[in-house]
Amino acid sequence: MGLLFLMPSVTIRTTTKKTVKSVVGGQERVDVVSRCLLNLYRWQKRINDELSLVLYLSHPEELSVIHIPISSIKSNLKDELDSIEEFLDILSNPRIFDLNIEKISFGDLLKKLASDTTFFYFTPEGTPLEEYTVDFDKKKSVCFVLGSQYDLTKEQEEPLYNLGAFPISLGKRNYLASHVITISCYHILKKQSASNKPIFGR
Ligand SMILES: C[S@@+](CC[C@H](N)C(=O)[O-])C[C@H]1O[C@@H](n2cnc3c(N)ncnc32)[C@H](O)[C@@H]1O
């Protein structure tokens, strides 16, 4: 079973020149995604299920997805600069990593994933994480959906809810996307070691 973290970014472009220095300076807020990648890379060392970052490029001239299984990262990511460099390499030449950037609408991506995935959507309006006792199809993958530096738009939320996404709240505090990933991975790990079950919510 896979654990996917799906995040839209409206600012990241595939066609612009970016360097580690420009990203550190805030270009296209690539830093937000790089931090998520670094956290997933670190958590993958402790979590048995395969983790992936599914980045949806929602800029009107992109409308495409890149699915990055953490196992496709071959470098040793020691810090944020390493993960920025790795992410820029993936973005500029995905084939080297056996990945590809696929043109698709956000709605169609959700529909495609829905056939073998249960969605959990991180939103402060959701049900508190600790209260979840959802019994879902254990053969399916789990896809956590979250915003990047911006929340999901209403147009992105609507198809997600229509596909039965379970809204999860982490409380009133507004967390960075990378922290949301860390909190959920921590919870998953706790569940794994407590009950030998591979995912929270059961
Ligand atoms: C940095 S936030 C996005 C922008 C932010 N909401 C704002 O007002 O500036 C990143 C994402 O993490 C998730 N998130 C942050 N805090 C959360 C919370 N308390 N409960 C559930 N999800 C949260 C949401 O999916 C959110 O879109």
Image (cartoon, helix red, strand yellow):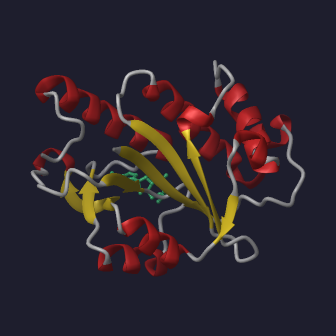
Q: Position of residue 132 (x, y in %)?
A: 13, 51
Pick the residue in front: 151 or 44.
44
Residue 97 relative to residue 173: left or right? right
Q: Position of residue 24 (x, y in %)?
A: 76, 37
Give x and y (percent) for residue 21.
84, 35
Residue 101 shown left or right of residue 115 in the figure? right
Q: Residue at x 86, y 61 (%)?
A: 15
**Residue 97 or 146: which is nearer the viewer?**
97
* Occupied quadrant, residue 154: bottom left
Q: Position of residue 141 (x, y in %)?
A: 33, 52
Among all residues in the image, which is located at the extreme right? Answer: 17
Quarter of the figure that contains the N terminus: top left
Q: Ligand 1 is in which quadrant of the figure?
A: bottom left
Give the total of numbered labels.
0
At a point 70% along the width and 77% down the height, the residue shown is: 60
- Front residue of 122/65: it is 65
Q: Is residue 143 left or right of residue 199?
A: right
Residue 57 sits in quarter = bottom right
Residue at 48 percent of width and 58 percent of height: 147
